[in-house]
Amino acid sequence: MSALPLRRAVGSVRSAESARILGTLVLTLAVIGWAGADLFRQDLALLGATYALLALGMYMPFNLAGALSLAYSAYVAIGGYSVGLVATKTGWPLPVAYLLGALASAALAVVLGFATRRLSGFYLAAVTLLFGMAFQSFLLDAKDITGGAVGIGSIRPLTVFGSELDRQTFIALTLLIVWIVGVAVDRVRRSPFGVALQSSRDVPAAVEAAGVGVPALRLTVLGAGAAIASLGGGLFTTANQTIGPDTFTLHLVMLAIFMPLLGGQGSAWGAVLGAVLVVELTFNLQIFERSGSLIFGVAVLAVLLIAPGGILGYAGQGARWLRGAATRTRGARR
């Protein structure tokens, strides 16, 4: 008898997870349909996908493990320049560039994380910020590799089985990749590994006492986050067929920090929702003209004051309240 409530609870969790996966897939397909063949909407969808991958990459080390790294502009740029170099210097297929960029970014993040393993909080953010600034200077100075201020252009499009993908198909593929990464990150969050990450952020001494190495956990998640961000840079570069040192700046990283705060830190989909809202506020709402970033800052402040759990957290509270009210109403009728 005692096993029956447990089975029901497990079944309820699985049903909620399946509903979440299906619901986000439907929303992704809706965005693909909304973008269609309209070039402006395609640009918005592509930018939103790039922001979402960057936010998902930062979500893992920052929101789950509490490790704030501001070197993500370097990781995104590595993904973009990997595509540019492979497309213009070799005959390799572009997916190889995505893999190489992800591996290089992950390795760099692990090395940087190991070098700063004794730092935390403001000091970690300051050191990684300086690294991001130094990397941008490197992109300008290494003209033989990066093309300097001009960057790399005339990047060939992605081909599948010898056929070039048109822009509309590529945008749809990019959005589906965001959905796959979002599902994966959200599953990691609820996995034992994700629980250990969150525990290492809140009670690191207890995690160490349990025999789990907190530094190793953080290095792992820093590498994974950098690889995800690098993928966003590679896809963005493939779509635009050009990459330069000003394509991905530190300003983008600053926005990415607040995306999960706006959307909701309790789920990886909060990072995706925050990315969508950033694009909407800064690019698509013409009534605000050039004040989109200011409006975004005000929106984040309002959300933190009204709903500290973010928009998804607030919506979840509302859904639980409605279910509770419905349950009480049915009980009163009986």
Image (cartoon, rainbow, N blue to C red):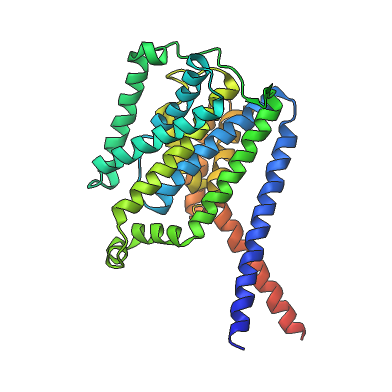
**Quadrant of image for the C terminus:** bottom right
In the displayed structure image, the side of residue 206 where residue 263 appears, left or right: right
The answer to whether residue 21 is above or below residue 320 is above
The answer to whether residue 303 is above or below residue 111 is below
Query: In this orientation, which residue lies closer to the viewer: 328 or 5?
Result: 5
Residue at the extreme right of the image, as rendered: 333
Residue 306 percent coordinates (x, y)? 51, 54
Residue 3 percent coordinates (x, y)? 59, 83
Query: In this orientation, which residue lies closer to the viewer: 29 or 188?
Result: 188
The residue depicted at 73 percent of the width and 41 percent of the height is: 30
**Quadrant of image for the N terminus:** bottom right
The residue depicted at 68 percent of the width and 78 percent of the height is: 328
In the displayed structure image, the side of residue 60 where residue 331 appears, left or right: right
Quadrant in the picture for residue 272: top right
The answer to whether residue 291 is above or below residue 86 is below
Query: In this orientation, which residue lies closer to the viewer: 294 or 82?
Result: 82
Circle count: 0
The residue depicted at 52 percent of the width and 45 percent of the height is: 271
Residue 304 percent coordinates (x, y)? 47, 51
Residue at the extreme left of the image, as rendered: 118
Query: In this orientation, which residue lies closer to the viewer: 4 or 316?
Result: 4
- Can residue 309 be seen in this snapshot? no
- Can residue 2 be seen in this snapshot? yes
The residue depicted at 59 percent of the width and 17 percent of the height is: 156
Residue 186 percent coordinates (x, y)? 54, 53
